[in-house]
């Protein structure tokens, strides 16, 4: 007899932040900016190898958070764009990952 497979209940999408909440969060992270339905920051490094090392650190942090940024790599510059796609815009998850990524940089 075949076993029936039951799916775990889906986690509801994170709630989108209001414009006021986004402004408040961006005030805490002035290096980040709002672009459409996302937040974005460009990081500059000495060379391509340093940029790629940073991207690998971001990949591990994003995987741990189960929240994955869009990445654009141009030699020594890395642009991260964060948006909670299943919520259709910016959520607290985006700012949480932005804080984690910022902490990866040397002080």
Image: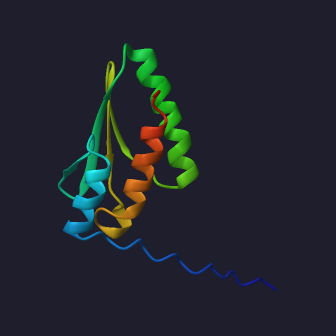
Q: Is residue 23 left or right of residue 96?
A: left
Q: Is residue 68 visible?
A: no
What residue lies at 35% left-to-right and 64% top-to-bottom?
Answer: 91
- Where does the N terminus fall, quadrant-wise? bottom right
Count how many numbered circles sit on residues in the image. 0
Residue 43 x/y as whole percent:
32, 30
Q: Is residue 96 visible?
A: yes
Picture quadrant of residue 5 = bottom right
Q: Is residue 104 left or right of residue 40?
A: right
Query: For this rendering, which residue is in front, 79 or 20?
Result: 20
Which residue is the extreme one toward the right? 1
What residue lies at 50% left-to-right and 47% top-to-bottom?
Answer: 62
What residue lies at 77% left-to-right and 83% top-to-bottom?
Answer: 2
Q: Is residue 12 left or right of residue 32?
A: right
Query: For this rendering, which residue is in front, 10 or 98?
Result: 98
Residue 86 x/y as whole percent:
37, 67
Residue 21 x/y as whole percent:
27, 66
């Amino acid at each position: 007899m075949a076993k029936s497979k039951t799916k775990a209940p889906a986690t509801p999408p994170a709630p989108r932040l209001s414009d006021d909440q986004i402004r408040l969060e961006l005030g805490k992270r002035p290096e980040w900016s709002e672009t459409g339905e996302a937040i974005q920051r460009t990081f500059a490094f000495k060379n391509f190898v340093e940029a790629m090392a940073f991207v690998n650190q971001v990949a591990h942090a994003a995987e741990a958070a189960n929240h994955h940024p869009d990445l654009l790599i141009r030699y020594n510059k890395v642009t991260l764009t964060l948006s909670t796609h299943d919520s259709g815009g910016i959520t607290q998850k985006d700012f949480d990952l932005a804080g984690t990524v910022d902490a990866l940089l040397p002080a």
